[in-house]
Image: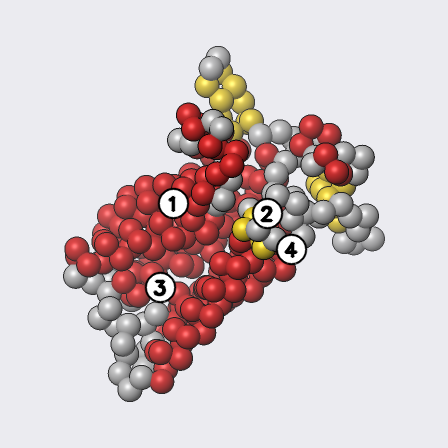
Amino acid sequence: MILAFQFQSPGPIIFELGPIALRWYGLLIASAVLIGIFLSQYLAQRRQVNPDLIADSAIWMIIFALVGARIYYVAFQWEEYAQRPGEIIAIWQGGIAIHGAIIGGSLAGIIFARLNKISFWQLADLIVPSLALGQAIGRWGNFFNSEAFGRPTNLPWKLFIPPDRRPLEYINNPYFHPTFLYESLWNLLVFALLLFLFFWGLRHREKLKVGTITLVYLIAYSSGRIWIEGLRTDSLMLGPLRIAQVVSLVAIAFGLGGLAWLYLAKNNPAKNT
């Protein structure tokens, strides 16, 4: 079958030199950040925005995103970390969440925009295509770490998980849904959609309002995350609810409400906000 393929991670480490280890996850994240900065600077030039603002804001956003991703993860795993408070800051051991990173990065963007007297929505429109592409790249880190996989499956496409990485209830199941791949492909589609909107907007400036690309990102990414999250075995929970699905529903509602706010207004309310 054309669609029959099996994934198996070669391991999380590229190479080791004494106590120093180069990990796939770190390399992928660093690559995504660098590619994203260059792409957003290019988009800024096309919109006649100073590209230096992208590099300057990136420093803020990366720091806030890392802190936000860790706080978010620890908050929903508090029972575990309450027993080992010394590990709360041990981000190198894993344990970050993309929704926390988006919240932290957005907060940084708002502060940066206010300090530099520019539109937050204008800045966000230049960054979210890079964010979607970065998420597509970063999800492959989950593959190398054998984490963030779905439920057991016998589909022609599947992911082999070593016994020491399997949940106890699935210890005898070798193959799982490659949810890292599902989300990576979904994010690539979102990236393509955002780029299409961006370049279409360059030709139809009067029709595509500032803030549209950001709000479409929220709706598009969250729509995919809802169904993909439903397959995963390691979801952060809020009682019986998968918190990522709850946050995604809120993001979709915010995105739809935001689009109504933009396009029902007579002027462009996000242009100077």
Measure the C-alpha gap from mark 2 to mark 4: 8 Å
Dot 3 amino acid type: Asp
- Which badge, 1 or 3, is on the more N-terminal residue? 1
User: Which residue matches tag 4?
Assistant: 230
Answer whether residue 184 is visible to the viewer in this image: no
Residue found 20% across the figure and 63% down from its top: 118
User: Which residue matches tag 1?
Assistant: 68
Label disc, if present, on residue 125 of the rendered structure: 3
Outermost residue on the top side: it is 18
Q: Residues within 10 Å of mark 2 (few under 14, many from 20)?
A: some
The kind of secondary structure element at disc 2 is loop
Residue found 32% across the figure and 41% down from its top: 63
The kind of secondary structure element at disc 1 is helix
Tell me, yes or no, whether the two marked residues, 1 and 4, touch with CB atoms within 8 Å.
no
> Measured from the top left, where is residue 114 in percent x and y?
19, 59
Dot 2 amino acid type: Ser
Measure the C-alpha gap from mark 2 to mark 3: 29 Å
Nearer-the-camera pick, 202 or 176: 176
Measure the C-alpha gap from mark 1 to mark 4: 23 Å
Measure the C-alpha gap from mark 4 to mark 3: 29 Å
User: Mark 4, mark 3: which one is toward the viewer?
Assistant: 4
Q: In which quarter of the image is residue 241?
A: bottom right
Dot 4 amino acid type: Gly
- Which badge, 4 or 3, is on the more N-terminal residue? 3
Dot 1 amino acid type: Gly
Answer above or below: position of 174 versus 195.
above
User: Which residue matches tag 2?
Assistant: 235
**Total marks drawn?**
4
- Which badge, 2 or 3, is on the more N-terminal residue? 3
